[in-house]
Each structure stands twice: as C-alpha cells, then as structure tokens.
Image: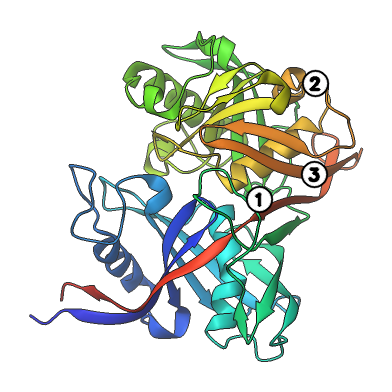
Amino acid sequence: MPQRRFRAVFMRGGTSRAIMFRQQDLPADRAEWDAIFLAAIGSPDPEARQLDGMGGGVSSLSKVCIVGPPTRPDADLDYTFGQVAVKEALVDYGGSCGNMSSAIGPFALDEGMLPHAPRNGPVEVRIHDTNAGRIIRARFEARDGEAMVDGDFVLDGVAGSGAPVRLDFLDPGGARTGALLPSGRVLDRLEVPGVGAVEATMVDAASPCVFVAAEAMGRQGVDTAQALDGEGALLEKLDAIRRHAAVAMGVARDAEAARARPSLPRIAMLWAPVEARLANGRVLAASEVDLHIRIISMGQPHRAVTATGALCLAVACRIPGSVPARLLGPADPGAPIRIGHASGIAVVDAAVVADEAAKGGFHCDHATLFRTQRRLFEGAVLVRG
C-alpha cells in the first residue's frame, strides 16, 4: 500500500523539536490524527529509539504541533500540542509545551498565515494555546517576510546562538485545573504508599507541575540527567508522587488513572543553590543560580528544564512558603529568577499578587521566558498507508 504524504515542517523550538502541521492539511476527523502522529514520530517503539520515524527517543524530541485559524476573537492563531509517548501508542494532549510555543509564531509567519504581519521589524502574535485555553503573546523579529533565526541570544541546551523569541503567558493560572494552586494550599503533604509523607507545592501555570525538595527524596548533590536515567527506583517513587499529586490537583480520578496520562502533571526535584556539574562537564557555581531543578517528563529525566516547568517554577518562587520559595537563594526579589538545569541556566520571571478571592490566595498576571527557534526541514512527512 502506498505511503500517505502530509505537508509538514520539522522545527526546533527552545530545547525541543516537533513536527509542525497546518490544521488544514490534516483530516477533518480528529479521531484520525493520533495514528498519523504516532506513525510520523515512530511510536510505539519498545527499544525507545524511534528509528522508523522522526522522533529522537526522548520526550523532548517526540512532539507534534498543529497550527490553525483562531477559534477565539483575541487570538491570531490556534495552537494544539501533542506529546507522543516513545514506547506506547499514546498521544497526550493534556499539557502544553512552552518550548515549542516559541516556534508557533515564526512557523505561521513563514507559512503565510499572518497576512497583516510586517515584512520587516517586530512581530507580535497572539497564540491561543488550545491545550490550556490561554493566550501566549509571542514577540520576535521578521526580515524579508520570514522570522529571523540568527542572533546573539544563547539558550543553554542548544548549541550556538539565535534570534530571541519573547513569550508572555498571560493569566496562566489554572490553565488545566481552574486554579493557580489547585489544592487551595501553598504547601501540601502527600501520603504516598511506598514513599511515605512528602511535602510538595503544586502549581498550575501554563501547565500543571508538582515540586518536591530533592533532600526529601534522599538526594544531596545535584544529579545530572544522565545519572538519573539509571535511578529506576527513584524514578518510580517520583512517578508515584506525581500520580498522587494528579489526584490532589484534580486532573485524575485516582492514582491508577494518572498512569494513562504521564505528562500531567510533570514532577520536579529542587535544590538550593550549590555547585553543580552540567551534562557537558561544565561546573555551575552556586552564585550563578537561584536554585536547581531536575524535571521528569513522560517518565524520563529531561535534558533541560521544560519551558512550562520553568514558568511554573518562576510562579511558585513568587509565592511565600512554597517549596521553591524556601529553597530560593538570596536573590533580589525584583530580579528575574536564574534556574540551574541539566544543561545550563534558564532565566524566567513571573508577576504574582495576593488575591483573597482566588483559590489558594494568589493570582499570576503573567509569566515570561525567552527562547530561540529554527525551521529545520520542510516538505512532507510520510506515513505508512
């Protein structure tokens, strides 16, 4: 049977890569999408290599994005994200991808989907993140009708430099659960069978995330992502905490149901500022960061902090009494937050205010990060017939 061809673009957004589709090039029946995406990426693959597709064997390289016309009046585009499991026949639309969000505006500009955008100079695109039901404001530069790629902005985890894309996640609280603090508390004590009692802060800003202190997991020095790969028992414990947090956050009816949605919420371990070795051998001094994070995505230690994880962490750092706020170094309260991750440093910020009317008592006006992006390949992706 002949293979099927779908117009597509392969792009890097931040520290992730994805196959980009225009909604108009996909079947009108969305029930057909998952099979296309799984085949295009190369999942399921029990050996976790995805050699028969475009995936890279890890969660950050196993993604799809669908871009189409806006379905709400305050947006220029709709953006739907699909996280494709590596070993399972699963496409999870439960969470968003902040990294790939940086590619959406440039993709749309290059595809001619923004007819009123300037050919040269600053471009502002209002992106409707359909996974979260929120607006992301992307700002970048155009040259000769295309998004600029070259620049001097360095994003740790990506070789070289590029043109920056500023992403403002507007009113990101409760994107999935309806509340910035879904449990209504800044600090929760989760009773997890096989693990015990664990203090956690659960935040839903752009996408749900749960934060625990690494010390509570018996970790002292900051682990590299590669070292965590071999810590099967630890990863199992973290996933058990994640699944119980999913119930507490209201995104799963029970811990077993949470197994079927491994991307929601993400879980991360945090350390106070200490010296830490990166994947490339560089050693970060304690003075270079405000805290360290190692985040788990789809059961795998991420090679860099996910963008939505960084945003959630920035928000949590601005909430007094949270796990991140207690570990935060003596930084200027008004300065951006420097997050040490497995590949370097991410700089993020958030504006959080007390709000007695909000569940948990806090409201986030916006959270901001900077990324780079690049179009890598364009044409058609082939899917077995």
Q: What element carries label 2?
A: loop
Residue shown at the point (65%, 57%) measured from the top left: 152
Residue shown at the point (45%, 85%) measured from the top left: 24
Query: Where residue 143 sits in the image (x, y, percent)?
Result: 65, 81
Q: In this image, 50 relative to 369: left or right?
A: left
The label number, if any, that marks residue 350 in the structure image: 3
Question: Residue 255 appears in which quarter of the rendering?
Answer: top left
Q: CA–CA distance between discs 3 and 2?
A: 16 Å
The label number, if any, that marks residue 321 in the structure image: 2
Query: Where residue 14 sits in the image (x, y, percent)?
Result: 55, 54
Q: What element carries label 3?
A: strand
Q: Earlier in the sequence, mark 3 or mark 2?
A: 2
Q: Name the residue type under label 2.
A: Gly
Residue shown at the point (24%, 58%) measured from the top left: 42
Tag in front: 1 or 3: 3
Q: Which of marks 1 and 2 is nearer the N terminus?
A: 1
Q: CA–CA distance between discs 1 and 2?
A: 21 Å
